[in-house]
Image: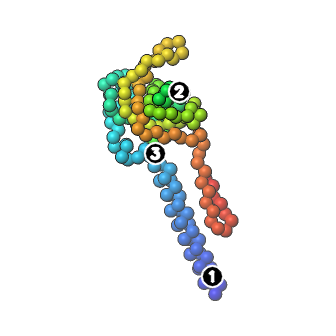
Amino acid sequence: MQALLKVKIAIGILNLRRILRAMAVLLFLNGCAPAISKEVRDQVDPAATFESVLHDPDSYKGKTVLWGGKIIQTRNTKDTTWIELLQQPLARDDRPIRGSASEGRFLIRHEGFLDPAVYGRGLELTLVGEVRGRETRPLDEGEYSFPVVSDRQLVLWGPEQEPTFHLGLGFGATFSR
């Protein structure tokens, strides 16, 4: 009887380990999933890199891009919200890579109202949008020629923190990442 109990406990522990491994793999795969849908991603023109559009926005008018960066400012006009971003390269999950070198700035033109309190300075943003050309605006004591993109899909990332995962196993143990 005692031997049978030990076997059942051992099998239970093995099953628990398998379940935990499977959950860890699923969480890892979910953490690397892109934020932009495949349908929208398929519309992106790979030749329309930030660097190439920055140098000649007019030749890329109408092209679809996938870019991201850190919000510098959000400003609303009568019917439009303008978001100025400091471009940053994107990770595999489409999130801007923190601390990475930027190639410049760009403007997002959003039809309608976006609250500057929600789309605030320093937050990370990823977008798929259509290149509309350029707009020259003052920047410090000079002028800057911004590529302008109308958004199709925006992803606003949360504060700079790692996600936390809690797993309760029913017997009082909790695993945290």
Residue at position x 43%, y 40% in the image:
153
Q: Give the amino acid type for the residue marked by disc 1 in the picture.
A: Leu
- Mark 2 and mark 3: span between their CA atoms? 25 Å
Give residue 168's quadrant in the image. bottom right
As displayed, is residue 112 above or below residue 143? below
Per the image, the residue denoted by label 3 is 35
Q: Return the residue at label 2.
A: 75
The quarter of the picture where residue 115 lies is: top right
Instruction: Give x and y (percent) for residue 96.
Output: 49, 37
Q: Residues within 10 Å of mark 3 (few under 14, many from 20)?
A: some
- Disc 2 is placed on an element classified as strand
- Colour mapping: rainbow
Front one among 3 and 150: 150
Mark drawn on residue 5: 1
Residue 110's x, y, as percent?
Answer: 45, 32
Name the foreground residue: 13 vs 94.
94
Amino acid type, residue under disc 2 in the picture: Arg
Residue drawn where x is 59% and y is 71% of the image: 13
Of tags 2 and 1, which is closer to the observer?
Answer: 2
Looking at the picture, how far across and down is residue 25, in whole percent?
50, 58
Residue located at (49% from left, 16% from top): 138
Q: Nearer the viewer, residue 174 or 80?
A: 80
Q: Quick one: label 2 or label 3, which is nearer the N terminus?
A: 3
Q: Please state if 11 lies on the left or on the right of 41 as rendered.
A: right
Dot placed on the residue nearer the N-terminal end, 2 or 1: 1
Instruction: Give residue 120's position: percent from left, percent from top.
Output: 57, 33
SS at badge 3: loop
